[in-house]
Image (tube, helix red, strand yellow):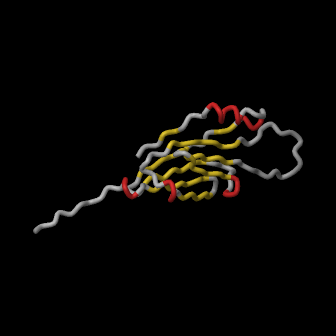
Amino acid sequence: MAETTVPVREEHARELTATREDSRYLTPPVDIYETEDGLTVVADLPGVDKSSVSIRVENGILTIEGKPSYETRGSAIAEEFGLLKFFRQFELADEVDQDRIQAEAKNGVLTLRLPKAEKAKPRRIEVKVE
């Protein structure tokens, strides 16, 4: 199984440029590991909590979106930066069981488990002696 990053599609690019501030986003860095059971995707989403992350699968495309939040310790006198949204898409192989994908978020790190479909798992065939 291999991961394929999906480039931003033209219709999504137009959607992102609807307003000036919302048109900017970050592509979160990810590590992808393959195990016997499937793939594990680890994405860094600093400042994004469980309620601010959206993960969905549609037409074989896995989409990760997250909006970071932060609290200030007082009244802002000047603000020179803003936290950007995170956005990343991956094209899923047919070997991924899309109905059993699991996600866990902890300390700004999102871990996705993409299990292999049963038909994609190697199996051993025993030889019977007659």
Query: Is 18 above or below relative to 34?
Result: above
How many discs mark residues in the rendered view?
0
Q: Residue furthest left?
A: 130
Asked whether, in this view, residue 64 is left or right of residue 113, the answer is right
Q: Kindly identify the residue that appears in the image at 70 percent across and 57 percent down.
A: 51
Q: Position of residue 115 (x, y in %)?
A: 45, 56
Q: Kindly identify the residue that appears in the image at 65 percent across and 33 percent down.
A: 11
Q: Which residue is nearer to you in this view: 77 or 59?
A: 59
Q: Kindly identify the residue that appears in the image at 40 percent across and 46 percent down.
A: 1
Q: Position of residue 52 (x, y in %)?
A: 70, 53
State which quadrant residue 14 falls in.
top right
Q: Which residue is nearer to you in this view: 19 or 81?
A: 19
Quadrant containing the C terminus is bottom left
Q: Kindly identify the residue that appears in the image at 56 percent across and 34 percent down.
A: 7
Q: Position of residue 114 (x, y in %)?
A: 48, 54
Q: Residue furthest bottom?
A: 130
Asked whether, in this view, residue 109 is left or right of residue 114, the answer is right
Q: Which residue is nearer to you in this view: 23 or 72?
A: 23
State which quadrant residue 30 falls in.
top right
State which quadrant residue 87 falls in.
top right
Q: Which residue is nearer to you in this view: 61 or 46?
A: 61
